Image: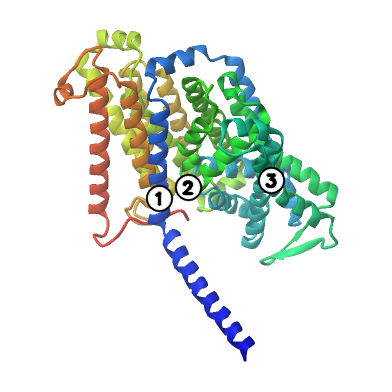
Amino acid sequence: MASSLIKGTFIRIWRVIDWCRARFNSITNHPRVTTFGSLLIFLIALFIINKELSNYTIDDIVESFGDFHKLNAFIAVIFAVVAYVALTFNDRLCLDMIGKRLSYSKSMRGGLASYALAKTLGYSWAVASTARARLYKKWGLDNSEVGALSMTTGTGVQIGSLTCAAIGLFFGAPEIARHGTFDAVFWWILSLILFLPSLLWLWFCHSDKASFKWGNTRIFLPTFKGGLGHLLLVMLDKIGAAACLYFLLPDYGGWNFPPFLAVFVLAGLLGALSGAPGGLGVFEAAILTMAPNSQNTPGAAVALLIYRLAYNIIPLIVATIILGIDHAAPVAKPAAKVVRRIGTRAINAAPQLLSLLVFLAGFILIASSATPVFSTRFIKVESYLGPSFIEFSHAFSAVIGMALMILSNFLWRESRTAFFMSTFLLALGVVNALFKGLSYEIAAVTGLAFVLMIAFEGEFMRKFGRGGFTISYRFLAAIIGSMASIAWMSYFAFSDVKFTFDMLFETGVHAHASRAMRALIAAGGTFILGLLILWLLGDETEELEADFD
């Protein structure tokens, strides 16, 4: 009688716990909660970064750029390449685990595109799975096999990250203890705990259970030797990524490499949990705040910018180019041309990659108008075109940039109308970037996005209204977060200027702050106008919804 009473009590308690868990998941997994929660975390991170840089000016950042050694950038790019090569081999080994054989060129293209997207957007596990589904289905994998592939690759990367953190804590515990509040013993114990996933992985590979089922797909475990090699490979990804930033930081950020490796993994984990695109802001804030007191903050800020370029932006562009070559190759064959005419086309991740590049181009166009320009170039252009044209082109650049950021939402959905509008605005952005101050760097980035868009014209075939005239939660939060970061950059750049209403009407060569204010207002006005137009085009009862199919 007593045992049945105890059993019934435990069952009731379990049901209550399960009900609470289900309710918690239903709230926290809602697109609005996850997206705008990520935005809130990003804004908090932006506040922390501002606090870290509050004692410095834009001149300190510029000086740090001048002191930066190009050799360090080259070394960083080499380590970034090593990290991505390791990730592509991770895809290949995991394909072997599910019994699929693909050429390395295909697994390399699939892995590079998947990881480039996952490391640029938030929620990397889901994003990588979506990208793989679009690519690997074309090469013969079904839904179950793609799911098993995503599970094995993602699990491998996480085990490798935790093992790297464990090694960093084990060898760097005394150094971390000197800069933190916990004793070295605490970090040694934590390192032993973090070693457990890799030990379990090696134990499973050594056990007699050679395979197990994931859905409808059977996964074959490697031998102990193969499992160890796989573990070292995924560790090489995290070590390469950490070394990419480590060699960029002035005086290595005041760290030896083992403790920095642990700090890097923790910062990356915080960025991933935030859900912010690529952990942007959260990762940087973690690196700056966890650094020793000897950290050169302006130099670290420059290093973080170059790291983002080397580890996120360049791989994203390279992945898009590789897919472009892969997409263009069959067009040269007559049979493929016939197939193309009847409307059959391969679905891959190109529209999503291009959507990110167009969003990035829009961000750069707004940021370049809301921050100081090179005076020598500016004076040269003003002498030919006159001050009125220059002032207009700065505000117009912000309008183009915001329009591109809004249109990138529909490029993600493969809208053909958005494609034509975006390519027109990109071409206009190239010309405008030259007119507003000979900003040939901005023109080059925008021009590259334009060329890649033209190359992928056939991938954008859906009607504009397909999926609704709405901006997804993720894109809406990304735009708001981007505008917040641009506004902060403008505030930081002009921290010595007292902003007043009269500044809106100031012009001239040195009225940089006034131009920045007008650009921010123009971008904000375009954003509000764009939302109003989309609301009028769509159903009045529609809500903003996520669309990442």
The residue carrying pointer 2 sits among few (fewer than 14), some (14 to 19) or many (20 or more) residues within 10 Å by Cα, namely: many
Residue 33 percent across, percent down from the top left: 39, 55
- Say whether disc 3 or disc 1 marks the residue closer to the N-terminus: 1
Residue 407 percent across, percent down from the top left: 36, 42
Q: Amino acid at mark 3?
A: Ile
Q: CA distance from mark 3 to mark 1?
A: 32 Å
Which residue carries the number 1 mark? Answer: 37
Q: CA distance from mark 3 to mark 2?
A: 29 Å
Camera-nearest label, 3 or 1? 3
Q: What residue is at 38 percent from the left and 18 percent from the top?
A: 58
Q: What residue is at 64 percent from the left and 22 percent from the top?
A: 75
Q: What residue is at 29 percent from the left and 9 percent from the top?
A: 379
- Say whether disc 3 or disc 2 marks the residue closer to the N-terminus: 3
| Position of the N terminus by quadrant | bottom right
Camera-nearest label, 3 or 2? 3
Which residue carries the number 2 mark? Answer: 275
- Say whether disc 2 or disc 1 marks the residue closer to the N-terminus: 1
Q: Secondary structure at mark 2?
A: loop
Q: Is residue 240 visible?
A: no
Left or right: where does residue 99 sit relative to residue 327? right
Q: Amino acid at mark 1?
A: Gly
Left or right: where does residue 45 sit relative to residue 312? left
- In this view, 187 is above or below 542: above
Q: Secondary structure at mark 1?
A: helix
Q: CA distance from mark 2 to mark 1?
A: 8 Å
Which label is found at residue 189? 3
- In this view, 106 is above or below 546: above
Q: Is residue 230 visible?
A: yes
Residue 451 percent across, percent down from the top left: 47, 31
